Amino acid sequence: MYKKLFTAFFICFIAFAGSAQDTKEDIQKKQQQLIQEINDLNNTLDQIKKNKKQSLGQLALVQRKIQARQELINNINKEIRRLDDIIYNNQIQIYRYKKELDTLKEQYSKSLVFAYKNRSNYDYLNFLFSAATFNDALKRFTYLRSYRQYRETQVSNIVKTQELLGTQITELNTNKTSKSTTLKDQSKQLTVLQEDRKEKDQVVNDLKGQEKDIAAQLKQKEKTRQQLQQALQTVIRREIEAAKKKEADRLAKLKEDEQKKKAQNAASNNNPPANNAAGETKSTVDKNAAGTNAVALPKTNRVYSPFESTTEEMNVSINFENNKGRLPWPVDQGFVSTHFGPYEVPGTKLKGVMPGTEISLPIGANVKAVADGVVSAVFDLGSGQTVVVRHGKYFTAYSNLSGISVNKGQEIKAGKLLGKSVAGLNGEGQIIFMVQNDKGDNLDPERWLKPR
């Protein structure tokens, strides 16, 4: 009974060790990503420190670095727990091999004692020739040969078990060494984390002394935000009106063509149209309007949008929706300095609202479209230019650019270069990336972009 339980317990540990191996790869991959991100943040921070004044971007960067460092420490803790489990499993297997080795040695010792006591050739021959029949003698001969093979197997099992035991001991020592190295790395990261937190406190204290300057920046940001919001609302209203007019023109053209066709048929048959021709024309037009150039709304109670009057336009919207959480970032470098929604400046009473995602990055960095679409507008708010791209019934806006490389009405693909980033109010490179729907509602851009 105990032997069966021990065997089941051992099999569970083997299965766990197999799953832990996969976890090890995931842990190492995540650790490399975090280390790379921290290195990038440190490089960006070194560039920002050249500015004599502390900035909100620097604070956001330090906060993100602390968060990444904490994630790295948590990742290291996972590695330590994984090694603890493997070490414990190694110890269980070593104990098992030792017990098995002791049993094998004891059995082999008994067989040697038996062989020693019966080592005489006379006794061996006497055992054979004392058989009553030939078949009995053959059975005795087979038994003696099997016994000799059994002893050889015992020796082989002892050697193999010793090798397995040695392998487990070596693996145990290797894992203990790995754990020791990981613990040192953990201690190092904890020390650096404390330094990062001190750096954050220093930045916060410096920002307190610049509260008036920051308040002025936030006031200017709010003014720019309102201007940007109004400009986007104007663009969306204009696009809606254009879409409605386009649809009305298309239906009018269909109706006109149908009426001409009816008149031609009547003239050729020398038969004037019936009194209900207008009704038939309207019915036919409505039928044609629902043909290949228009699309019926899905049964999922999808809200009608003027931007989805055709199959092609609706497919653009659906494609944009299906890629939520997987859209590429508009920049290849930089970090989020202000997230979507309301925010506060630590250490002060200052507050603000971000309609999109503010990304700090080097001045002159490339800014690209996140999805296929049509350029709805290009305008200048004074601090930099803004590009608005429509993706069906969704809009993305890229603000604070220079060197615009697209034009209004141009169809573009995801990854198309739109322009270059310019300096923000604090002298650092910054852009604001926004996502809106056809109602003019601001959506959280980071929910649409793929994780970095």
Image (spheres, rainbow, N blue to C red):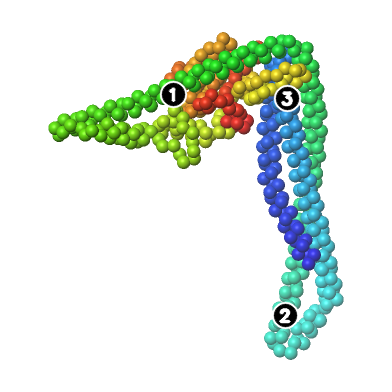
> Residue 141: which numbered mark, if any?
2
> Residue 63: which numbered mark, if any?
3
Instruction: Name the kind of residue labelled 2 in the image.
Output: Phe
Foreground residue among 206 and 45: 206
Instruction: Name the kind of residue labelled 1 in the image.
Output: Glu
Q: Residue at x 28, y 27 (%)?
A: 256
CA neighbours of label 2 inside 10 A, class few (<14), some (14 to 19), many (20+) = some
Which corner quadrant holds the N terminus?
A: bottom right
Q: Secondary structure at mark 1?
A: strand
Residue 155 to residue 275: above or below: below
Q: Residue at x 82, y 65 (%)?
A: 103
**Relative to residue 439, is residue 10 drawn left or right?**
right
Foreground residue among 216 and 110: 216
Q: Secondary structure at mark 3?
A: helix
Rendering coords of residue 120 (x, y %): 82, 78
* Real-space CA distance between mark 1 and mark 3, rounded to the nearest whole angstrom: 39 Å
CA neighbours of label 1 inside 10 A, class few (<14), some (14 to 19), many (20+) = some
Give the residue number, with chain letter if any, for mark 1. Answer: 411
Instruction: Name the kind of residue labelled 3 in the image.
Output: Gln
CB of mark 1 within 8 Å of CB of mark 3?
A: no
Which corner quadrant holds the C terminus?
A: top right
* Real-space CA distance between mark 2 and mark 3, rounded to the nearest whole angstrom: 83 Å
Could you tell which of marks 2 and 3 lies nearer the N-terminus?
Answer: 3
